[in-house]
Amino acid sequence: MNHVKFGVQTPTWAGAGGAPSGRDAPLYERVDWKITKDAAILAEKLDYDSVWMADHFTFGRDNEMLEIWTTMSAIAALTQRVQLGCLVMCILHREPSVLAKMAATLDYISNGRLVLGMGAGWHEPEIRAYGLKFPPAGERVERTREGIRIMKAMWTENEPTLKGKYYSIERAICRPRPAQPGGPPVIVGALSPRMLKTAAEVGDGWNMSDDPSVELYKQKLVIINDWCKKFGKDPRTFLNTWDGHVVIGKNQKEFEEKMSILRKTNLSGDALIGPFEGGQMLQNCISGTADKCIEKLKRLTEIGISHFSLYFLDYPSFDGITTFAEQVIPAFQ
């Protein structure tokens, strides 16, 4: 078995109390930098491969959200080994040229630990609230493709000049260069046919979020692999990543107790209680005792997934992170 990588999604927003997107941290009452920081430091101590964050301005309970670049930079200074990733950076939030400079700097000062997730953006309310444009889906996809090309040019060329439909640069010097040759790997968040094509065309890998099932991931992977071949890329070198949730117990009793607490959480909107009661999230997330989690993960790795980015649903407790590292990760080493 090829080495499988596991990453921890650090809590950068809280979900308790009926917050939108509360399912990612349903027991977490308030945003607390200490919890975010300690989760990242613990992830490195427990030999996780990466630490991940989401790119939003307003999210979670009372729309209280840590800004991603500031947070990643702070965590870079507090860690030595783990990769630093974002799933995913919204192309609408920052000019690609400025983002390229920020990414180059973070990769340089972290000794080549950045993994740059990129996406077309979807959360219209926060984007408009911050005075940014939210164009139609087709344009957002084109902006993503064009923006990634600009970033890669700035990481590899001396004074690149590119004139695109939406973005342009003129002799855009980007020094110091990223520590990783060619720049950090770009992982494109993709689900729609257009984004799957974009991922294969300009990305180094792709991500599918929200606990995708084995069957759904396989369907999308066929499309990705076909596009990789058409663009002259070897699908075997393309990074296939999975983003989802974990509920793990040291034993069946502890697992059932955690599930009982989660089911009682009073949330609204895209709340935890809906997906769990409907069976979709519970069926597709990584859940159960260590043996059950390993069984599910092996089914996912067998279809080619090489990196998992995981939300542990018992935050602010670190029991889940610890149990998973001690009882699950060794089965994949």
Image: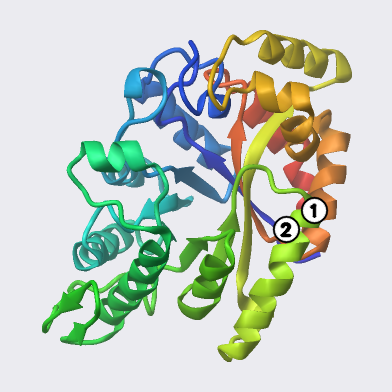
- At 17% from the left edge and 86% from the top edge, which residue is drawn? 161
Few, some or many residues within 10 Å of mark 1 (<14, 14–19, 20+): some
Q: Amino acid at mark 2?
A: Tyr
Judge from the rendering whether residue 190 lies leftward or rightward of residue 128; answer left or right.
right
Judge from the rendering whether residue 48 lies leftward or rightward of residue 251; answer left or right.
left
**Residue lying farthest to the left in this orientation:** 170
- At 24% from the left edge and 80% from the top edge, which residue is drawn? 164
- At 23% from the left edge and 72% from the top edge, which residue is drawn? 166
Few, some or many residues within 10 Å of mark 2 (<14, 14–19, 20+): many
Instruction: Give the labeled residue for mark 2.
Output: 217
The image quarter containing residue 272 is top right
Residue 247 showing in the rendered view: yes
Determine whether 115 is above or below 309 in the image.
below
- At 47% from the left edge and 35% from the top edge, which residue is drawn? 10
Q: Position of residue 209 (x, y in %)?
A: 59, 48
**Pick the front one: 210 or 318:** 210
Q: Position of residue 66 (x, y in %)?
A: 31, 32
| Label 1 with label 2: CB-CB less than 8 Å | yes
The image quarter containing residue 123 is top left
Q: Position of residue 119 (x, y in %)?
A: 43, 58
Q: Amino acid at mark 1?
A: Val
Judge from the rendering whether residue 89 lies leftward or rightward of residue 23; answer left or right.
left
SS for callout 2: helix
Residue 114 showing in the rendered view: no
**Pick the front one: 117 or 106:** 117
What's the CA distance linking mark 1 and mark 2? 5 Å
Q: Position of residue 162 (x, y in %)?
A: 21, 85
Instruction: Give the labeled residue for mark 1.
Output: 214
Judge from the rendering whether residue 84 lies leftward or rightward of residue 72; answer left or right.
right
Quarter of the image where the C terminus is located: bottom right
Quarter of the image where the N terminus is located: bottom right
SS for callout 1: helix
